[in-house]
Image (tube, rainbow, N blue to C red):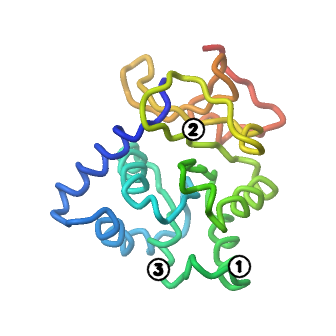
Amino acid sequence: MALFTEAQLRAAAKVSLQKSHSPTASRVLLEKSEAAAARTDFDMFLSHSVTDAELVLGMVQILEGMQYRVYVDWLVDTQLDRSQVTAGTARILRDRMKTCRSLLFLTTGNSVNSKWMPWECGYFDGFREKVTIVPYFTRSTGNGYYGQEYLGIYPYTTFGPDSDNVDRIWIRPDALHYLWYNDWVGMPNASMQWKDA
């Protein structure tokens, strides 16, 4: 199980770009928006900085390849203006979060400047408690992640094969314990039973 890297996300984005023959990650993501807009429930709410379109495309490609339904606000609710913090936008995002099983918080250098990400994380944590951090690194740093500031209170996400060599999303509270995403999202936080690594 390893942390997500820039190379991995950009490679996944490149595959998606090649399949669609579109020149930009933003364009491919917008092409995906029509299909996503018809959905009424999602497995994952992907909290991210809109300036990370290529990384978001790579993450969506990986997650959808594992059959997860991923909510990305500017793809599904294209009418939203992320540059404006309004009560209407907040209402739409709250309603969408209620249709998601978990929130994945994609940390990058751009996420610290996001107006929405801290709010999304806090709201989802209070509502459903199923928040996990997706640490992103420019190169492989091993399997450990210790978080920054308040993000350190949440488990983090890794990616890798299971015992049958099937790629999975793993949730880890630390480097010594883990759960498969599907087990983690279905288990109440108060009775979480982590497996030893």
Mark nearest the camera among 2 and 1 is 1
What type is the residue that disc 3 sits on?
Answer: Thr
Disc 1 target residue = 91
Q: Residues within 10 Å of mark 1 (few under 14, many from 20)?
A: few
Q: Residue at x 54, y 56 (%)?
A: 110
Camera-side residue of 164 and 4: 4
- Where the C terminus falls, by quadrant? top right
Q: Earlier in the sequence, mark 2 or mark 3?
A: 3
Q: Earlier in the sequence, mark 2 or mark 1?
A: 1
Residue type indicated by callout 2: Asn
Mark-to-mark CA distance, 2 and 3: 29 Å
Residue 174: image location, x then y, percent:
68, 24
Residue at image coords 60%, 50%: 105
Q: Position of residue 39 (x, y in %)?
A: 48, 69
Pointers 1 and 3 in contact (CB under 8 A)?
A: no
Tag count: 3
Element at label 2 = helix
Q: Position of residue 22 (x, y in %)?
A: 20, 66
Please name the amino acid that badge 1 sits on. Arg
Is there a contact, CB below 8 Å, between mark 2 and mark 1? no
**In which quadrant of the rendered view does residue 195 lie?**
top right
Q: CA distance from mark 2 to mark 1?
A: 28 Å
The secondary element bearing badge 1 is classed as: helix
Asked whether disc 2 touches disc 3, contact meaning CB atoms under 8 Å apart, the reply is no
SS under mark 3: loop
What residue is shown with label 3? 78
Mark 2 lies on residue: 182
How would you rate the neighbour count of disc 2 (Cα within 10 Å): few for under 14, some for 14-19, many for 20 or more?
few
- Residue drawn where x is 55% and y is 81% of the image: 80
